[in-house]
Image: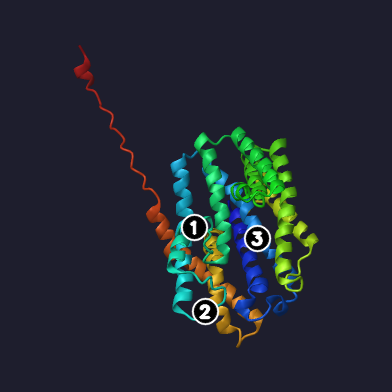
Amino acid sequence: MAELDLLRFAAALAVLAFHYLIAYASVWGDRPAELFPAVAPIAGLGILGVELFFIISGFVILMSAWGRGLGAFARSRLVRLYPAYWLSLIAVAALYGLTGATALNPKLSPADYLVNASMLQRLFNVTDAAGVYWSLWAELRFYLLIAILVLVGVTYGRVLVFGGVWLAAALGAELLGDPLLNEIVMPRYAPYFVAGMALYLIHKHGSAWLPWVYVVAGWAMSLHSALERVHGRIELAGFRNMPVTDLSVIITITVIFTVMALVALGLLRVRPRGWLTALGATTYPLYLFHSTIAVALIPLLVGDLPPWVVASVTTLVAVLLSYAVYFFAERPIQRLLKPRRTPQITSTPVVRDEKASVP
């Protein structure tokens, strides 16, 4: 679905804009919002690009899980998630181990990097090697929950039961505030995943009242979680450095849900193009590598060029290098790891001699 490729790339660019133009003060040596005051209120909303990723993930992962066994589903997710992740982890370790870069340095030991290689570092209270890795922990837990559904068999009815139970559990976890329950149920992110799954049901089977209830409930619950996430950032940096209003957050979340609903209904279609496929392929490496590229490049350029030029050049380099990572490294590794199909041997029918069969 080309429209999803486009939306995924837009989400990655939104996250990049948030980091480059709002968050990375240590990279710039100055507050980015003061360097880019005209776009800071919009760039600050890029923090919600991850929320768009989550709702797309709910849609796409259910689509990929439908009709698959547990082994095939697990292998497809591992092959999709880990190769680019390992490459980005190597890049982070090389950046801080071989250069004098200090911005965003996680200050990890070799053992910590090895734990990060599992993508389970948060389970062992080890710091993420890169800040963007936090969302991958949420994705992994989502995959584990979907694996339960795959194990019992994915059907329309079971998806509805699964989504309803998960939303109820998420609401309960939010009210109880139990840390362990929150880790399992993910009350802040569950509304996006469940809404994405419900939208896929609508896309696959047509509109029905219960999936739309899940979408609306997901939207309402996500408003609370999105506002809290933005408020946390404002408390950390101050409104001057994160000039995002509650109204703009509500509008952005509503737009995200509306656009995905239009995709599910078939009202937003984009004709498949080669360049759209390329953008979709670039999305995951861009999400993983853009921080490392910023740390390596921005401090080298910031003293000689205007901030807008530095940000534009760094973004262009990030996109091009991310596509190169996909084309020359990630794709070959994925092809190597994907299971090879065993060719089916077609038996040649035996032609009977009609004369010999005559008694």
Label 2 element class: loop
Give the residue at mark 2: 101
Residue plotted at (62% across, 86% down): 305
Residue 231 in view: yes
Disc 3/disc 2 C-alpha distance (Å): 27 Å
* Left or right of 58 in this view: 81: left
Q: Where is residue 90 in the image (x, y as percent from the top left)?
A: 44, 68
Disc 2/disc 1 C-alpha distance (Å): 24 Å
Using the rendered view, name the quadrant where residue 199 is placed.
top right
Between disc 1 and disc 3, the foreground one is 1
Give the residue at mark 1: 119
Disc 1/disc 3 C-alpha distance (Å): 21 Å
Residue count near mark 1 (Cα–Cα under 10 Å), binned few <14, some 14–19, many ≥20 = many
- Kind of residue at badge 2: Ala
Label 1 element class: loop
- Kind of residue at badge 1: Met
| Contact, mark 2 vs mark 1 (Cβ under 8 Å) | no
Residue plotted at (61% across, 52% down): 56
Q: Position of residue 41 (x, y in %)?
A: 75, 69
* Left or right of 171 in this view: 354: left
Q: Which of marks 2 and 1 is nearer the N terminus?
A: 2
Give the residue at mark 3: 49
Which of the pair 345/281 is nearer the observer? 281
Residue count near mark 2 (Cα–Cα under 10 Å), binned few <14, some 14–19, many ≥20 = some
Q: Position of residue 69 (x, y in %)?
A: 46, 39
| Contact, mark 1 vs mark 3 (Cβ under 8 Å) | no
Q: Position of residue 165 (x, y in %)?
A: 65, 38
